[in-house]
Image: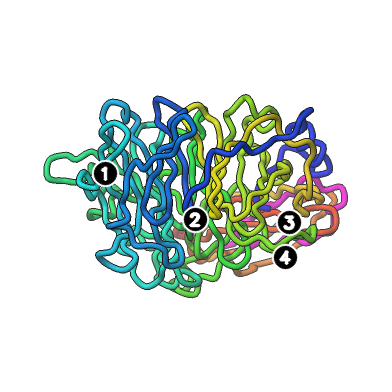
Amino acid sequence: MAKIFGLLCAFSVALCLAQVSAAEGASLQPIGSFEEPIYVTSDPGNPERLFVVERAGEIKLVSNGIATTFADLSSVVACCEVERGLLSIALAPDFDTSGLFYVDYTGKEAPGEIHVAEMQALGNSASIGTLRNVLTIPHPGAANHNGGQLQFGPEGDLFISTGDGGGNNDAFHNAQNLSSLLGKILRIDPHQSGPQPYTVPAGNPFSAATPPDDTIWSYGLRNPFRFSFDRLSGAIAIGDVGEGRREEVDYAAAPGLGGGANYGWNCREGFVEGPATDLPAGKCATTSFVEPIFDYPHIDPAGGPARCAIIGGYVVRDPGLGGLYGRYLYGDLCTGELRSFDPANPAASDCAVGLQVEDLNSFGEDSAGRLYVVSGKGRVQRLVGATAAGCSSPAQASLRRPSFIGLRAVRRKVERNRRGGLVAWVSPCAERRGDRVRLMQGRRTLASRSLNRACTAHFLVRVRHNLTLRATIGEDSTYQAAISKRVKLRAVPRKHRH
């Protein structure tokens, strides 16, 4: 893992026990049964008014235990080929006065076309006649990887997730392409400003781009089906569905929220290399990526059921959930197992909550901070009570102690065609002396050295042009693998000597 962990993995299970244990077990309280529900949220001013999104196009309002039809978009929603349909809604922060809310769906006009549209409620319902299209995103070629999450950020702007367009290995070349809105997180002010259907907020990192590419907030994502904001800290957490190897959680603190971040797909998949068969030679090696804070493999090292697609959740801020408070709750579509981790120490604290949901489709949060789980089989339930005791089936990686590797340059500027010195060090290293450290340029190994008695390895590299380098050390029976931050060596003209 390419992260620095504050605690040794030898204590990871004890850490999880201490944070998640309680006298009573958690439970799931039924809210109701629906037709293929896919998302749930609440009135910003009244957490007792829940809105359940059904994939085929209806939105149900649940109040006092009674479900009624709040809006029906089935006439405009293309459903339900593969992953298409009505995917989520977001109610405006001033919903109780404005009645405005926003919907994300695949439309019927063009195959796969993604729409973000505005509607306005009057009382307990909203007419399809109020539908105003805000943003249209072409999505030809495949019926999967639509993204589909809408969330208002802490500053009041609307964030939108889109998948890479579907197929394998980013077949349509979108995630790393800043001229495409696919494989991205977008940010807009959805309120109409004159003839424009939305406004580009000040501070968008690519605001100088040609519309609508100026809406891009971050990129390099495969299918960020669900993301959320921590209602206390404002941080964004993105559950990005992987290809065939890893599932990942990307995380960015407020106020930056990852603006301009490139999360790596398809050069990266979690902490490992991605397929990247569609990019120009050398692009992955020369591009800087923001690593996830957490990933997990499809094959469970502990022998449990195979995992396939992360369902991103929320940082728990419901005090009624005891030891789960402050932890990130997530799950997987294939296993339905609910898990959580501490965002400050993800791999070492990851563990099972002790609850399972068949066909887990989504999590939701109401305006009081209470959390919900949505099953594609029809059930919407609220997570209540104390959290489950213990940490079942911890990730195998947690059984190895974390290790950290650092890299620094003796000089950052090196005369062209001369050698630059670099020093790598590893911690902890009591059992690591003699292990090999590799110096990498992208995927290419430039040199390999053994750790000396001081737990350092020294390198000399000829600098013919600017270089971006990292140091890595492999996994062994005691320690996890580690990778350093990038160090750049700049080639400068040679000085004339007389």
Residue furthest out toward the right: 431
Spatial separation of the CA atoms under disc 3 and disc 2:
20 Å
Crowdedness near tag 2: few (<14), some (14–19) or many (≥20) residues, C-alpha within 10 Å:
some
| Residue 176 in sight | no
What residue sits 27% from the left and 48% below the top? 117
Q: How crowded is mark 1: few (under 14 residues within 10 Å), some or many (20 or more)?
A: many
Q: Residue 290: image x %, image y %?
A: 52, 51
| C-alpha distance separating marks 2 and 1 | 36 Å
Q: Mark 3 points at which residue?
A: 481
Instruction: Say left or right for 303 vs 102.
Output: right
Q: Which amino acid does label 4 sit on?
A: Ser
Residue at the disc numbered 4: 448
Image point (82%, 37%), residue name = 14
The disc labelled 3 sits on which kind of residue?
Ala
200 falls in the magenta region: no
Report the front residue among 454 and 31: 31
Q: Which residue is drawn at 26% across and 44% down?
A: 118
Q: How crowded is mark 3: few (under 14 residues within 10 Å), some or many (20 or more)?
A: many
In terms of sequence position, does the residue under pointer 1 or pointer 4 come before the other? 1
Count the marks: 4
From the viewer's perspective, is the residue at label 4 or at label 3 nearer? 3
Q: Which of marks 2 and 4 is nearer the N terminus?
A: 2
Magenta range: 418-440
Asked if residue 431 is among those painted magenta in the image, a careful observer would answer: yes
